[in-house]
Amino acid sequence: MDGMQSALQDRGLTVTNLPEKGRCLFTNKDFSPGEVIISQEPYVCVPNNSSSNSRCDGCFASSNLKKCSACQVVWYCGSGCQKLEWKLHRVECQALSRLDKEKRKSVTPSIRLMVKLYLRRKLQSEMVIPTTATDNYSLVEALVSHISDIHEKQLVLYAQMANLVNSILQWPEINIKEIAENFSKLACNAHTICDSELRPLGTGLYPVISIINHSCLPNAVLVFEGRVAVVRAVQHMPKGAEVLISYIETAGSTMTRKKALTEQYLFTCTCPRCIKVGQYDDIREGAILEGYRCKDDGCSGFLLRESDGKGFTCQQCGLVRSKEEIKTLASEITALSSKTLASTSCNNHQEALSMYKMIEKLQRKLCHSFSISLMQTREKLIKILMELEDWREALAYCRLTIPVYQRVYPQFHPLLGLQFYTCGKLEWFLGDTENAIKSLTKAADILRITHGTNSPFMKELIIKLEEARAEASYKLSTKNE
Ligand SMILES: [Zn+2]
Ligand SMILES: [Zn+2]
Ligand SMILES: [Zn+2]
Ligand SMILES: [Zn+2]
């Protein structure tokens, strides 16, 4: 631990133990927006592989993959990644190869993550894999597991998974209870590794990054460059500030965020947004993001439930929507949504498109215009329309989501930047250079802070923006001639 403390000291950081919060990461110097606070390679990681979708174990690439011929479980994009992983996979491969075909199918990404955790610990203790102050098992040991707060059902599941890990490793001295506890540790500490556009690729354990606490109004953001976790400041952080990232989707009412945090991370958030629970501002925000729209189409008021339970009253104009009307619409949407989920598994985009359009229409009738669920439906429509290459309609929905994104996310949020990026790409593609430049500039201004400027993803964005600007000035010069 002291080794880690001095390694962090050199980076302008310090770990402090607070009685009410446990370990916290604090700054020892100022950090400016966009500056990297800390980056870390995973202690262990695995791609989210399934039978239909595989990724390279080294870099998470999904093309040109070859299966490891010995275990038939793990994939690599080439000999480079295979060599990089070999010290660990050599022993993992032996263990996996012992299993019969049926059992190999039960080796899910979470099981593999645990197997790799034990194997890496062993290889580090045997000094086959070197340890450093920020890469050693004692940092994993120091992570919280919340095991005493876990539901009985979940404990049984962890015990079953621990037995499977035991049968793969076949170590006589292994402690099954400890494996089960480590599953609980992974559940509240492991991070979903995403690509630059925040699509999930895998799971990794980053014991130093895990020290960073949560806030629904964070001053830093976690993104991944390949499998390296990178935390950047999204606002000016003075010396002595606690580094805070968000563990959850922060767009949502306090109740929704609270539910997500207790269910997955087993703690109660006391951030500046959460302590407002029950106050007028918080109730209003919840009613806008997750509540109903006014009966009058032209009114943007938010609705609150009447104390007699008969309806919902607009807080701006006083019009009342009856409980029955709301209930009918809501159940229509629920029925349609479950039908859509069941039928879209067959990948029929046209069918999915018309169903989500119906849902969107009903949600427009029911929900406030800043509703999160309406935004999510439009998000799905954009994805489907892109698949169908209907750029014009995709752009129309994308533009509708922007004001909602601006409301629900802080100024420098990766999702807001990515939405401007999508908008800009579509505008440029459709020949609307002027608006494309505006959108791409907004995207670049945000993503420069959250993603840095060196990743291939950001370089591509900056090139696109330069091309769009060149095109615009060319158009202008030909017009003036
Ligand atoms: Zn690779
Ligand atoms: Zn293998
Ligand atoms: Zn909070
Ligand atoms: Zn109204």
Image (tube, rainbow, N blue to C red):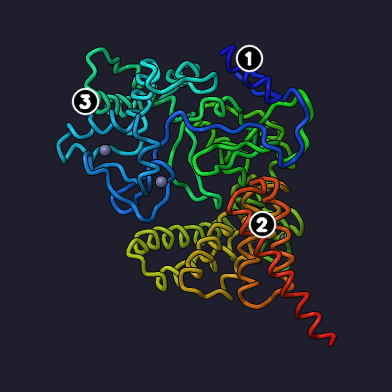
* Sequence-wise first label, 3 or 1: 1
Q: Give the side of residue 15 with respect to residue 346, left or right.
A: right
C-alpha span from label 3 to label 1:
38 Å
Amino acid carrying label 3: it is Ser
Amino acid carrying label 2: it is Val
Residue highlighted by disc 2: 404
Front of the two marks 2 and 3: 3
Front of the two marks 2 and 1: 1
- In this view of the protein, which residue sits in the foreground, 243 or 332? 243
Q: Please say if 83 is above or below 320.
A: above
**Residue at image coords 58%, 61%:** 366
**Residue at image coords 64%, 46%:** 451
Can residue 184 be seen from the camera position used here?
A: yes
* Sequence-wise first label, 2 or 3: 3
Amino acid carrying label 1: it is Asn
Q: Residue 188's x, y, as percent?
A: 48, 29
Confirm if mark 3 falls within 8 A of ligand 2. no
Q: Which label sits on residue 354?
A: none
Q: Residue 92's x, y, as percent?
A: 28, 31
Q: Please say if 207 is above or below 72.
A: above
- In this view of the protein, which residue sits in the foreground, 285 or 93? 93
Residue highlighted by disc 3: 167
Q: Residue 274's x, y, as percent?
A: 66, 34
C-alpha span from label 2 to label 1:
38 Å
* Sequence-wise first label, 2 or 1: 1
Report the quarter where the C terminus lies.
bottom right
Q: Which label sits on residue 17?
A: 1
Mark 2 neighbour class, 10 Å CA radius: few under 14, some 14 to 19, many 20 or more: some
- Quadrant of the rendered image holding ligand 3: top right
